[in-house]
Image (cartoon, rainbow, N blue to C red):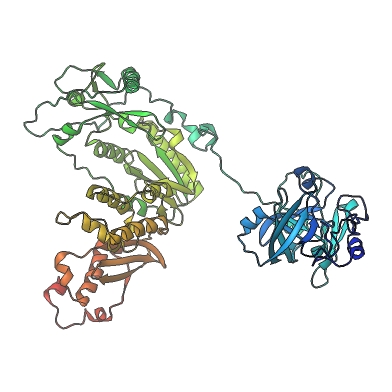
Amino acid sequence: MNQAGPNGGQNNNKNAAANNNRNPRGGGENNHGNGNGGSNGNGGNNGNRPNQGRIMVMNQAQANANDVVSGTFLVNSEPAYVLFDSGASHSFISSSFVKKLKIEPTARIDLNVRTASDKFVTCGNVYSNISILISESNLPGDLIQFDLKYIDIVLGMDWLGKYKVRILCDEQKVILKGPNGKRISYKAITSKPSMRLMTMQQLRRHIRKGYETYMCFMKEVNTGEPNIYQIAVVNEFPDVFPEEIPGMPPEREVEFSIELMPGTAPISKAPYRMAPKEMQELKEQLEELLEKGYIRPSVPPWGAPVLFVKKKDGSLRLCIDYRELNQATIKNKYPLPRIDDLFDQLKGASTFSKIDLRSGYHQVRISEKDVPKTAFRTRYGHYEFTVMPFGLTNAPAVFMDLMNRVFRPYLDTFVVVFIDDILVYSKTPEDHEKHLRLTLQTLRENQLYAKLSKCDFWQDRVAFLGHIITQEGVSVDPSKIEAVVEWRAPTSVTEVRSFLGLAGYYRRFVKDFSKIARPLTNLTKKTTKFQWNEDCEAAFQELKKRLTTAPVLTLPSGTEGFDIYSDASKKGLGCVLMQNRKVVAYASRQLKVHEVNYPTHDLELAAVVFALKIWRHYLYGAHCKIYTDHKSLKYIFTQKELNMRQRR
């Protein structure tokens, strides 16, 4: 860029001489005089006309040409493509890069810039003292905003003169002096660089020498289903991971049975109407189930309607509406494990493998006497299941019973199981090899089959039952929290209950969950009229915020002591369980009706008792310290008289 002078110019000759610089595109040192210095008046006093300049590089070919001296440097801590241009009397910054830096102009001037196409463009925003880092030296400059398309920064004569810059075009090199007189040299990279890995020490050395350096980030790309033969140990058990379950499940000790309440008559309902697309899908799925032997034609008086539910991938899942049959079924009381108890077994583990069974329910036979009760009606016929279908009330309990029997020798040693999800955990890779082999051998011996695409092996971080598990502890699975974040404000009591149910699954991660959720839980009371107010909205948003920023909870060790921090107020009771200064769990509850009138002393004591009860399984036999902000509780054991409430 050429300009008569910083303030409009007073002397054409002087300006012409000032532009006698090295040509950034020529070889060696070349006179770059301003031919327009006097003839067109750009350099003289032009009255009220704004200052004028010239920009040399505008198109992509010129910006990336091999005969320009340029490089990538940190400008205000952001990587920028910078051009050294002795043909410019000002330094410029592109409008797009200004937005990236998020900075505001410090001054304004009126400057007409002549482009390579001989057109004038007016610009004026000035950004002062912008940091430019070259070879670890900060060389700040004042930059004028301009619409540069292919360059972030143009360093013109104002900056080049300030740092006594010499541009050696034939060597593609720049030599300058820093603020302390230090000689700085930079050589541009003109050839296409080859890609190679280097050590951190090499990288630092190259940066000190002023080489162009780029930072690359690795990204994991899913290339499709894993190859079983590339996974250690797993490659020894290809028969455990078939594409389809091979035939009917074997006869086992555990079979699915349906015990009905006395006096229950056969239940039969007419088929639901379906769209043509659903009819075609129904026909195909019936043929597939018949071929596998999972269903067979039926003629009993039982019959439930069928419907389709869309899966995440858009395909349709065949479901049987067994609601009336479930209501008449005696419930199986076999307990499902608590999620918290499963995670407590993982302390110290660093290597994990997750195994998901393929169509797990279809790997359990139905007791022959109960097969007719599973009958369902369709337009294409009347059928009954020979294997356990989805939708029956006792199915989870029966499958949990089977898995506990299969893995009983290894449960809570290196295996945890929740229905058809299996987690193998180990403290070392060497142990994990043994544990994984034993687990897969057990599946093989019991003719249970897994789906390879849903399994993860040899992981240090694994998603399991809606949580992320690592050596450091347990955290909320972000993919599961998306539903909470995107939840719109409830418009009915049913929607409030649904939200609290989902959020409550992660309540152990949220301090004072009950206190925060109090306005929402009040809406679920039968005596309360539904009215969404500011308190409800605030509680709703705060719960979503807390869940998205939930901490990692450490896994407790039974050999070390615990610390309990308790607190109470008229809104509820809250407590925190910690070990080695790390949070194990949060717990809270609202006050019961009769507790609202408790004095402060008794409320604080109630919070301590609440913590001891809810975490008894951790604290039993362990050393425990209790911290409270109510000093009088220190004397509870030496108090001469206790009221009836305190005695309880």
Q: Position of residue 88 (x, y in %)?
A: 82, 57
> In the rendered image, is residue 211 in sight?
no
Judged left or right of residue 202, residue 492 is left
Q: Quadrant of residue 293?
A: top left
Quadrant showing the C terminus: bottom left
Judged left or right of residue 20, residue 457 is left
Toward the front, the furthest residue is 47
> In the rendered image, is residue 317 in sight?
yes
| Foreground residue among 221 and 68 | 68
Q: Residue at x 62, y 49 (%)?
A: 217
Q: Residue at x 90, y 51 (%)?
A: 170
Q: Position of residue 478 (x, y in %)?
A: 43, 50
Q: Residue at x 28, y 52 (%)?
A: 500
| Foreground residue among 379 and 486 | 486
Q: Is residue 292 above or below residue 555?
A: above
Q: Quadrant of residue 208?
A: bottom right
| Foreground residue among 350 and 64 | 64
Q: Is residue 282 above or below residue 479?
A: above
Q: Position of residue 378 (x, y in %)?
A: 24, 20
Toward the left, the furthest residue is 263
